[in-house]
Each structure stands twice: as C-alpha cells, then as structure tokens.
Image (tube, coloured by chain):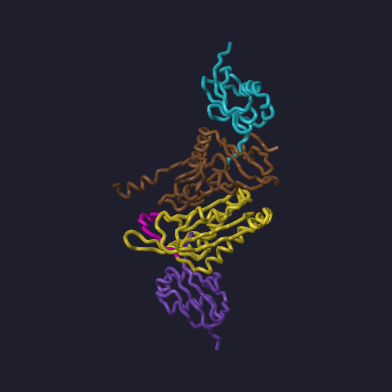
Chain colours: A yellow, B purple, C brown, D cyan
C-alpha cells in the first residue's frame, strides 16, 4: 500500500487528456479528470451547438477531424499553456459526428492552484483550438441545405 | 529526370465533397514547390480551383501554405488538403 | 402547444440561479441550467477543497453562510456582470456544511453568445464572491486543530 | 433619554465561537454610531475584543464598518457580526 506521500506525488504529475469521440460529452467526467487534491481551482469552457445561423434554423451539426494531426495540434497548445501558466491537468474533449442542438461539441478543463491561471489557460486553449486544430463543422439547416463553417480565428483563411 | 515518389493525399470537409474521395495516392516529383503540388492536385480535380484561396496543406501533419516553399517529399508522405477549420 | 418561436422567446429570458446547499454539487447539473440553444458558450469555475495548508493536512472543510444576505450579495454581483458583459444565464451554487477534500465547494456557470463574455464574467464572479459574500470556511486539520480562513480578497480585513 | 429599541445580533464563524451564541436580542439606542454599537456588544462578550480589527457589521444585510457612521435603528433590525469571509 503506498504511503500518503507517495500518493501525493502520483497526483502531482501533470496530465494532458485529449479525446475525440462520437459519444455525448459529460462536463462532470471531464472536470473529474482534472481535479487534484493539491489544486483549488478548475476552470472549464463548454462549447454548445446553436440553433440558428443568419436566420436559418440549424437542426444538426456534424464534426469531422484530421485525427492524428488534430491531437498533435492540441498537444502543442497544451505545451504553450504550460510555458505561460502554472497549471496542473489539462483535458480537451471534442465530439465528432452528429451533435444535436444544445449538446456540447467541446469541453476544455484546466486545474490550477490559483484560479487566474486556469481561467486564462482555458481562454487561450479555446482561442487557439479554433485557429489551429483541423476540425470541421457542417451545419445542417431545416430547409435541407448545409454549409461547412469556418472559424473567424482560422489562421490562413478570412471570412468573406 | 527529377525523381518522383508516391504520396498519400487526404481530403477533408468541402475538399472531400468536391473530389468525392477522402484519400488517393498520387505520383509527384520529390522536390516540388507547395503551389506546384497544389496545381498537380487541381489538375486531377478541377473543382478544387474554387477553394484554392481558402485551403492550406498539412504535409506530414504540419501546416504549409500554397506558396513558394520547396517540399522534399518521401515515399508514403501524407499530404492533407485543409479547408478553413471550424472546430470548437 | 407553443410554437417554436414562442419557445425560443421563453429560452431567451435571462435567468439567475443561486443556490446554497448541503448536498454534493454537480458540474453537469449547473452547466445544464445555463445552456441555451441561442448561446454557443458556457464558461465555468469549480472551486475544490485542497488537502493541505501550510504543510498541515486538511481532512475536511466546513462552510457556513449568512444566508439571506449571501444570496443578496450574489445577486448584486450578477447585476454588475450584466452591466459589464452580454451574458445569458448565470448560476452560482455554493455548498454548505462539511465538504470532503477534492469535492466542489462552489460552481459558477455563465452562458453567452460569445465566449469572451462568459469567461470574463466567471472570473469577475469568483473574484467578487470571495471579496463580498458572507460565507465562512473552517479547515479541520489531521492533528485535530481547526482554523477559520479568510480570503485575501475580503474587502475589509487583510492577512497578517 | 435617547429612545432605545430591541435589535437582533447575529454571530458567525469565529465570533460565534467566542460568544457561544448564534444570535441574541439586545436593547440599544436607536441612534448610535457603529463603533459605539460594537462597544455595547463587546461589553457583553469581552472575548470579542480580540477580533475587533477584523470584523465588519452587516446592518439590515448591508455592510457597515465599525466607525463613525451613525446608525438609525428600528425595532427588530438585524445586525450581523461578520468576521473575515472565506467563501468560494
């Protein structure tokens, strides 16, 4: 049986948990992954699908990703975060495939001893994920048309 | 003659809709500028001309713009066509 | 049966959900309360209890609140947030009584159309809650001593 | 003689530990400076002197520092002794 001191050291090792999944995302699950008994703060961002775009009723969204690269790009963002802020664990979950309106497409969670670090890290993570991680969203509208979206943060293409 | 090799081209989102395929193997010069490589691909799928201004490559999973950068390709390299992203 | 337009209008009305409870807090529950089909962003802060303070092992925490006033003070913070940022729903849940280490003592969740607003609002909410809302935490240490804590943000008393 | 009235004093956290009670009714002048009111309360619970520098009042659920501010009290008013807070 490990001593308490040993358990603390196991807990202390910073983790990055990155997951792309077709399953419904759980805020509880993701926040549990980053909670540490040594940290007082967990900050989270949850991106949910909106029901409208330019007056058109969105009935569904579909996400696809360039998978090994998307994970690598998220890992790069995690490294950048660790260079900028003192944070403990980082979890980034992105849903793929069909996502019904009001369900989460992304959950980012960061734990830290001091809350400013995790709040700023979450902000940085979502900004950079939208700019650099190869994931695509297709909106499907009520009148059976659809459109591939682009993030305004996408670093090489600007909105017309 | 410039040495050639086979590379794997991956299409995503709108580029996959235009080409009708998600991946294909093409035979290209091992030393080629990024824009020249794009033209080789566009020759195979004329519809891609519509999105030329909006896409970027990922060569071996690193972003490369469609410009003058010289690519040194190895057999089996993965080249992805990346339309504007919209994750999050 | 209400038309979709009527349902959207019901959804649109901004809500503040403030709760003090002895029960375990659920991040899923609180985030569900603020999700809106008109909003793409939910930001959350989860405060958890730490297992140590100045080298002493914390085994439990106990929270008490001056209840009607605490709720009023949280409402004031919500009003200030609405003056500063365009946000949809705000939920503030604080646990009272005994809280085991690593469980959440507070969850703040804010939804907004644009994520910067909810991230900044959550930051403002936790900063001001720590400065102004009459809630007290007592830490109980392994060696059976205990101590009432003070936030460094508390606006009338400074740490020695 | 200055009119007096009954008010309810609430004690929280360390102040409740010192006094041993969570609330009590006291009889005080209706017009009284905050610091004077504190002294009335301290007279009943000498141990409170230790935390005088750290506490603030909440009078009818609004913060009032222990200073020169004149309080106009009504019968039944709620006056809470608020030690440094530590929520969150």
Rendered location of residue D38, percent (x, y)? 63, 24
Task: Give the camera-side residue of C63 and C156.
Answer: C63
Task: Give the camera-side residue of A89 and B46.
Answer: A89
Task: Give the camera-side residue of D33 and A28.
Answer: A28
Rendered location of residue B67, percent (x, y)? 53, 73
| Above or below D10: residue C143 | below
Q: Name the residue at 36% across, 58% down.
A: A59
Residue C24 visible, this orientation = yes
**Total numbered labels placed on residues in the image:** 0
User: The C terminus of chain C is located in which quarter?
Assistant: top right
Q: Residue furthest left?
A: C1
Does the magenta-highlighted stretch encompass residue A51? yes
Q: Which residues are magenta?
A: A50-63
| Above or below C74: residue C8 | below
Question: Picture quarter containing residue A72?
Answer: bottom right
Q: Name the residue at 55% across, 63% down.
A: A74
Question: Picture quarter containing residue D54?
Answer: top right
Q: Residue furthest bottom?
A: B1
Dominant secondary-structure state across the stretch colored magenta: strand
């Amino acid at each position: 049986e490990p001593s308490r001191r040993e358990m603390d050291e196991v807990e202390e090792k910073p983790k990055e948990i990155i997951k792309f999944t077709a399953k419904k995302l759980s805020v509880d699950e993701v926040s549990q992954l980053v909670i540490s008994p040594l940290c007082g703060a967990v900050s989270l961002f949850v991106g949910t699908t909106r029901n409208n775009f330019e007056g058109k009723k969105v009935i569904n969204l579909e996400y696809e990703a360039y998978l090994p690269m998307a994970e690598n790009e998220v890992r790069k963002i995690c490294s950048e975060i660790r260079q900028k802020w003192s944070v403990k664990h980082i979890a980034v979950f992105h849903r793929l495939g069909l996502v019904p309106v009001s369900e989460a497409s992304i959950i980012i969670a960061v734990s830290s001893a001091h809350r400013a670090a995790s709040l700023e890290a979450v902000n940085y993570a979502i900004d950079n994920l939208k700019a650099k991680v190869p994931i695509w969203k297709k909106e499907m509208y009520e009148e059976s048309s659809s459109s591939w979206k682009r993030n305004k943060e996408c670093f090489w293409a600007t909105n017309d | 003659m410039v040495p050639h090799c086979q590379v794997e081209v991956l299409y995503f989102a709108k580029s996959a809709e235009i080409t009708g395929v998600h991946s294909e193997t093409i035979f290209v010069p091992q030393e080629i500028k990024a824009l020249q490589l794009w033209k080789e691909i566009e020759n195979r799928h004329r519809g891609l001309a519509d999105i030329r201004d909006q896409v970027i490559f990922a060569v071996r999973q690193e972003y490369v713009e469609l410009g003058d950068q010289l690519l040194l390709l190895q057999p089996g390299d993965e080249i992805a066509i990346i339309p504007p992203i919209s994750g999050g």
